[in-house]
Each structure stands twice: as structure tokens, then as C-alpha cells.
Image (cartoon, helix red, strand yellow):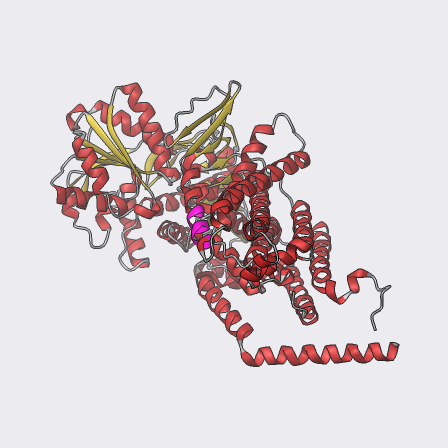
Amino acid sequence: MKNHGLVKKVLAALMAVSMMAALTACGGSGSSGSADSAEAAPAAEASAEAAGGVIKIGGSGPLTGGAAVYGTAVKDAAELAVAEINAKGGQQFELRFEDDAHDAEKAVTAYGALKDWGMQISLCTVTSSPGAAAAPLYDEDNIFAITPSGSSLAVIYQDADNAANPYGNIFQMCFTDPNQGVASADYLAAHPDLGSKVAVIYKNDDNYSSGVFNKFKAESEVKGLEIVYDGTFDDSNASDFSVQLTKAQAAGADILFLPIYYEPASLILTQANQMGYAPTVFGIDGMDGILTLEGFDTSLAEGVYLLTPFSADATDDLTKNFVENYKAKKDGEIPNQFAADAYDCIYAIAQAVEAAGITADMSASEICDKLVGQFTSMTFNGLTGQNVTWSETGEVSKSPKAVVIQGGVYVGVED
Amino acid sequence: MKNKKQLFIFDPAYRGRTASFTLVIAAYVILQALRSSGNLSSLFASLLVPVTCYIVAAIGLNLNVSVSGELNLGQAGFMSVGAFTAVCVSGRLVAAVSAGIPRLIISILCGAVIAALFGFAIGVPVLKLQGDYLAIVTLAFGQIIKSLITNMYLGFDENGFQFSFVENKCSLAPGGKMLLNGPMGATGTQRIANFTAGTVLIIIALIIVYNLIYSKSGRAIMACRDNRIAAELTGIHIANTKMLSFVVSAGLAGAAGALYGLNYSTLVPNKFDFNTSILILVYVVLGGLGNMTGTIISTIVLVLLPELLRSLQDYRMLIYAIVLILIMLITNNEKVKTMTKSLRSRFAAGRGADKKEAA
């Protein structure tokens, strides 16, 4: 060992002192630091005083890394909703959205940052496993949370294996993974005209994808749906699907069920087309977005079925208005279902806050108790469904809509 | 003149050790004081345990990379083994050992032992070879472990354990628990890790590593690193000697992973990927090879930095990268090096004068 300890000791001491200073500085600045760092809508800041304080809504999601597209969609849509609600007057809100990089560890530190900021209501997390890590903290501190898209059962249940011990103060805006699997199997079983032999390609290192597949498989056995092939892929080989497609074709599958996100699905559609294999493709809400994918020939998506709570082509005023504003905010990008769920989350919170008479001076715990009472009893109409209700476990009840892509737009399928 | 009655911690030969232990204990005391007086922000409170985990893993890696001179690119793989072992052990023992501390100790021990066993299994063929084979094999090991755990399903209920691979075939009785659930990893883990346990683990890691370095075996390990042929001629068994440091390193990574796994209610296998291995290697390289105090400080700085930059919002990762590059440049700058060198010699001269006066 070389002997140059002293300088290092001095440096170490300096470093330790500076870090302690940083720690205490951050510790004491609970609310004062937020004014310059939070990306609040300017309108909110201006009118906050008049309305008697703002209610602070926090949330975290991946703004960097591979899943950043979902996090930014949620962040932008939530900011849009907050700005709209604030512009209407009444109770004002302020949103702060932290990056968790789709990592449980970062989600817990993001939760700490939000708590230091003084978060009163939360959008929980965008993705599932960070949500599962942050959930017990929301439970401990009794802060109300509603996740736009954390679909795993582990986000709302302490014991996800048995769907037991719900946290009670964490709600979901999206369907749970099992629900989607069951709904897909039920739909296919009820429509034998689409085909009878099912092949599945799913992403086995992804919670969402394998969660849906497992339930789909279980429900298929109950409903007598025949799965002739199931193939997997993961992050490292998500570009070539010729092996899986060849096997599916060889097994004689006439339905291809894809419980995956739209990027790999677009590759599967392209490669199936090149092979001259044309099964009926059936997707779930992750498939939404395929029509807006850059560089993808949308004619390949013709005849694709998907179960989705939201379609950007719907003609009702609410959807049209949202799509227009979102496009204006994001340079013409068409919102996906993550954005729609986040937008609904904010509006649902605003509706409940108004109904319960919650004001900004209440503590997070007080607000939580009131909101839980509201959410379990109210009915909400939003982008992703009409007459949406929540059970006491936090699960949402809304009906997934089956749509088929025809002429480059979603067309509703009547049962 | 050497003062033989000097207390050993002031002995220059022990300076590195004294600095490490002082830093760890002082940081612990200050942080606990801040926390109990309510001055520590939630953000930093949530970082305490992961920082201690990374420090332990980095200390282990530093032993292997600098003392033994073997590059290990799969430290996260050993953390993964330790973490999932500990989570499973803890999940299985929830009913039997309800108290947190004993369960934590048992789980960490199991995690460390299993990770060390994996290290041993890898070391047996690889450490007999000369060259960078350990780097290649540990790189592969990290990837293989990630894929294996992603495809493992382990559940238990009143009838005992159920295990399946690739496909989830476990059908548990009501009240059963999935300990490993494929890509979902482990969920619903009781969070029994805490900062005190992390600090104790760092101190244990330092004691193990320093005692190893300054022992006869430690000198043998360094001899193998510096001149393999000469070491072999003096009768040192190269493979066995290197094995000692590699297994200790893997065991420490396992213990670090175990503590990490028990700090979160959920743990996914994807967490311990190649990037995590490289990150730990960066902590070690930046802190200085062979310098445990440096490793501890660089780990703290590099874990805290992105969190301190949270207020910069979108520019956070950009600034983080720039700061990293700056640190690398500054610490390697010739002028800075000469400056620290002259500073050091001035200190040394001053001390020499003191000693003369005292004599």
C-alpha cells in the first residue's frame, strides 16, 4: 500500500464537511426550494394567492432511460390538465413530476424528494415495479395516490399473490394486468369467427407483458381457447421475430395475440408481412400508439384488433379537445393511452377535491382520508371511460373497448 | 526515531485504515443525529441504505481489482445472487423469525455465503488461467444470472416449496407466497434493512478487507499480482491465493445485495444488469485503486450527485455527465497532481520538523 494517506484524509474531511452542508441545506428547505425548481404552470403561480393556496400534486415516472416515452407522456398530459383546471379558477393545483428512470430505487428517492417538497396528493408512479416499491411509503405516510398506468397488482396490494391486504389509499386509473388478460381471452372465446388457434408472443422480462399473458393463458384454459404456440423475447433480442413467427405459422395459428407495447408489435407486423403470414392480430392497450409510430407503414396495421380504454380518433368533444391541446403542447405528437390516463387522473382528483371541500391548508393525511371516501363513492366521466368507479381495493371499474383498425383509424366493434 | 508506544491508530502504516473507520463512524454519528433531530430530508433518508450497499459492493470490488489485479465485470451479478437469496430466505422465515434484526442477519449471511459459493465455482476454472479471462467470465456471469432469475418461479405454501423454470407452473394454496416471480422478481418483501445495519456491514467489510491486505495471505495476493512467476517460484499457489480475494469480494457483493434487496418491497432482476456492474467499477476507479477511503467517498458522491441535481429537472443527467467528465479530467491533471504532491511533501516536512523538536 502506498503511503499517501494525509492529503486524502484532508480531502476526505473537506468532502465530508461539504456533504454535510449540502445535507442540512436540503433538509431545511422543504418548501422554499420548490418555487424555483418546480415546473409549475405560470398561470398557477399567478393566481395561487387569490384562491387561498395551491394543492401540491406530486408524481414520478421515467423521464430518462428506455421507458422515458411513457413518463414524458404522463408528465405532459398531467401538466396540461393542471393548467386547464387552474385556468378555470376555483381550487388551484401545482404539479411536480420527478424522474425515477423506471427503477425502484430511484422511485423511492423521488418519493423522498416529493415529500420534502410538501406533496399532498400523488400520481404515484407511471410504471409498475417502481410503483410497487413506493406503495408502502404512501401507505405509511397516508398520502393519497392514484397511478395512471402502474397496472401490476403489487402497486395496490400488499400481498399481490393472493390479491389480499390492499393498501386502500392507492388507486389505479388503468386496468390491472390480470383484467386485460381475462378480457382478451373472453373476447376471443366469444368471437370464434376471428380464429380458433392462438399464438402468443410476449416479452418475458416485462411485468406488464408476462402478467397479462399468465392470466390470458389461465382464462384460455377455462374458456377452451387453444393456444398452439407461445414465444418470448426480451430487451436484448427485441428486433428480430422471425423465429417466433415461423414457429407460430408452422403451428397453424390464425390468431396472433400480442400483449406487448407498440414498438416491438410494429416490427412483428412488418416481419409477418414479409413472410407472407397474415393471422388476425389482437393487442391490448400497449398496442395503442402504433398508428402514430414514425416510419411504420400503417397499412400493415389494417385489421388489427385491440382492447383499449382510449382512442385518439374518438369524436367526442372531450377527446378532440384533449388531442388538440396535447398536440399543440408537444409539436404535433398524438397522445397515447398513458397521456389519457394521466389527464383523467388529474381531473378525477380535481373532481374529488371539489366534492370533498378539500383546501390547500389541510395536511396530506387529512386529504387522503377524504379523497379515499370520495373515490370509493364517486362516478367519473373522462377520456378513458364513462361512469368510471373505484372499488375499496383501489381497482378501477371501466369497460375496455374492442376496436379494429380500418382505413388507418380505430373503428369500434359492436358485441 | 520510532515511538514504539504510539497507539496503533496513529501509526503511519495504519493511516488508511484509521481514515476509513473515522469517516464511516463520523458520518454515521452525524447522520443519525441529524435524523433524530428531524433535520435530515426524506430524500437523503431514503438514500442512506442504498449508499451503504454500494459502498460494501465497491469495497469488495476494490479488493479484487486493485489488490488481486483481476478485473471483475460482474459484481452486480453477485449482488443479484445475494439479494434474491436474502429476499427468499427472509420471505420464507417471516413466520418463523418475526423479529427483524435476527432475520436480517440470517438473510445477509445466506446471501453472502451463496454469492461466495458462486464466486468459488467461477474461480475454480478461471483463476488457473493467465490473462483477462476473469473479466470475460464475470461479464457473462452477470448476464446469465439476470436471465436465470428472470425465468425462475419459486413459491411456497403450507405444502412446501414449488419451483418451475421459464413457465410459471406454481399453483399455490390460498395464503401461499411467490418468493420469485419471474420477470416481476420478488414483491411484497418486508423492508427490514436499516442504516445502522448498513454501517455495521461497511465496518465489517473494512475489517475483513484490511485484515486480508495486511496479512501474510494479502502479501501473497499482491505478489501474485506484481510478478506471477516470482511468486510461483517462492512457493505461492497462484490459483488458491487469487481465489481467496475473489471469493471474499463475491461474498461482500452478496452481503451488499442482500441488504439492498431487503430495503425495498420489490426487487426486479433487471436492476442488477451490466450497467450496475460498471457503475460499481466507476466508484472504485474514481476513488482510487487500493484506496478504501477514496472508494467510500466516491461512492457517496456519485450516488448523491444525481439526486442533488434533481432541482435542475431536465438538465439533470446532462450536468451529471459533465461533472463526471470534469472529475476524471481534474483528478488526472498533471498540475493538480504536482500540487497535491508538493502539498503532501510540505506536510511531511512539517511533521519531520515536529518530530525533531520532540526528540
Of residues B78 and B262, the one drawn nearer to the viewer in this rendering? B78
Comparing B51 with A295, the one in front is B51
Q: If the image is split into quadrants, where does the N terminus of chain B sit?
A: bottom right
Determine if the magenta segment contains residue A254. Answer: no
Q: Residue at x 64, y 56 (%)?
A: B218
The residue closer to the viewer here, B10 or B28, is B10
Q: Which residues are magenta?
A: B134-142
Left or right, residue B274 beside residue A269:
right
What x and y, as percent, mark residue B288? Answer: 58, 65
- Dividing the picture into quadrants, the one containing residue B235 is bottom right
**Measured along the vertical axis of the image, is residue B89 above or below residue A272?**
above
Locate residue B226: give its quadrant: bottom right
Q: Is residue A97 above or below residue A350?
A: below
Location of residue B250 with respect to A33 vertically, above or below: above
Q: Residue at x 68, y 37 (%)?
A: B101
Q: Is residue B236 above or below residue B152?
A: below
Magenta region's main secondary structure? helix
* Residue B94 or residue A326, whichever sits in front: B94
Q: Position of residue B326 (x, y in %)?
A: 50, 72
Q: What residue lies at 51% left-to-right and 58% top-to-bottom?
A: B281
Q: Residue furthest right?
A: B359
Residue A414 seen in this snapshot = yes
Viewport quadrant of the C terminus of chain B = bottom right
What residue appears at the point 15 percent right and 25 percent down from the top-left corner?
A193
Number of marks drawn: 0
Q: Position of residue B299 (x, y in %)?
A: 58, 58
Viewer can see residue A143: no
Whole-percent x, y for residue A376 in the image: 47, 31
